Image (cartoon, grey):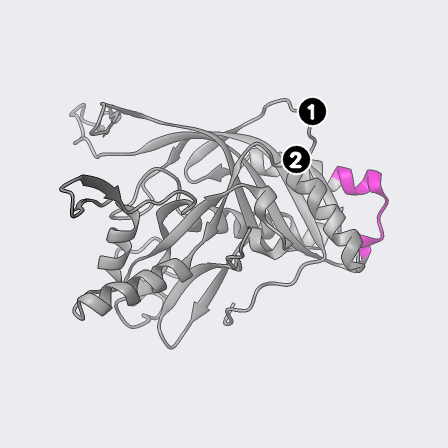
Amino acid sequence: MTTHAAPSFNALIVLPRLKVINANCIGGDITWGFPAITNFSGQMIALERRLGVAYGLKLNGIGIVCHDFQTKTYGEYVQRFYQQRAPLDKDGSTKGIVESGYIDIEVSLVYAVQADEALLKLSEEEHADVAAEVYQAVQEMRLAGGSVIHRRSHIKPQLVVLSDDSETRESQFRRVKRQLLPGFALIGRDDLLQEHFIELQASNPEATQLDALVDKVRVNHWSETDEAGETTWRHSKPEGSGWIVPLAVGYGGLSKLYAPGEMAGVRRNDVDVRIVECVYSLGEWLSPHRMTDMSELFWYPSYDPEKALYRCNNAYTCKAI
């Protein structure tokens, strides 16, 4: 995609309560605790390549709702990852231990689908069969490096054809949101990062957006003493400020775009290659029932050739609730 406009879609595929074990929870150089957004967008693209042509599906966005998680760590205040023994080399020698961060998660995935006319005209039973095929395909794929485990649930995967009527469409979204509870949807909060960056620059013109990111996600404590000598401790996380987290959202180019075969040691020699670094922003875990527009749930990939920026975007807009 070459535009930052929110994707169009006329249907949803809802895959409820997927259990993923040993997924990668190191989302970037400075973040950990949940797979990066690009893990999910990459899975969406791989799924479209696998089933899209056969079923008339174009997957334009993915919504992520987490119901449960368990990081493979130990420790109290300072968390450390459990390490796994690497297989022996061919000569029987041991390999060096490379730190790996794993997490078990239970997530529901909602795909924003642009379906063709033939798919839209199918019966409800045939739509259910398509959703079941997608669910089966996802179980055979990796998600953030983890394995998707089949589990029984009273909520079945479904393909929801969206109505053109706004009221009916809102009713359909309400039903989907109820099926995603209890859980928290991961959304983008670029607006909070920009607001905090402006606040920091007002007092420190040399502050960077990285300073704003670090300062926003940590808890700052300070004391205030009144005229009577009474001291009150305050902190930077007021009630109602939300569950804000640092988030790896894509990659920024550090080099020119090399032609296929021009750079040695890459995974594939038939595609263009460039050196990149991780791009960070802020995200928020938000209960789905607080969303008022269906598009706020979805992440979608974009590419800016002028800035060499590959990143995932989210259409959530903060509203007073």
Query: In the rendered structure, does residue 216 fall within the stretch colored magenta?
Result: no
The reply to whether residue 307 is in sight is: yes
What secondary structure characterizes most of the magenta part?
helix
- How far across and down, in percent of the image, does residue 9 sit? 67, 59
Residue 304 left/right relative to 83: right
Which amino acid is tagged 1?
Answer: His
Query: Magenta residues, as a range?
Result: 118-129
Rendered view: 82 above or below 223: above
**Sequence-wise first label, 1 or 2:** 1
Residue pointed to by mark 2: 179
The residue sitting at the front extreme is: 228
Judging depth in this view, the residue of 281 and 141 nearest the camera is 281
Identify the mark at residue 75; answer none if there is no mark. none
Residue at 81% x, 56% y is: 118
The reply to whether residue 264 is in sight is: no
Judging depth in this view, the residue of 127 and 231 nearest the camera is 231
Rendered view: 77 above or below 300: above
Residue at 86% x, 44% y is: 123
The residue sitting at the bottom extreme is: 306
Judging depth in this view, the residue of 237 and 114 nearest the camera is 237
Residue pointed to by mark 1: 154
Q: Nearer the viewer, mark 1 or mark 2?
A: 2
- How far across and down, in percent of the image, does residue 192 sit? 38, 58
Binning the other alpha carbons within 10 Å of mark 1 as few (below 14), some (14 to 19) or many (20 upward) gives: few
Say which element carries label 1: loop
Binning the other alpha carbons within 10 Å of mark 2 as few (below 14), some (14 to 19) or many (20 upward) gives: some
The residue sitting at the left extreme is: 229
Which amino acid is tagged 2?
Answer: Gln
- How far across and down, in percent of the image, does residue 308 sit? 35, 70
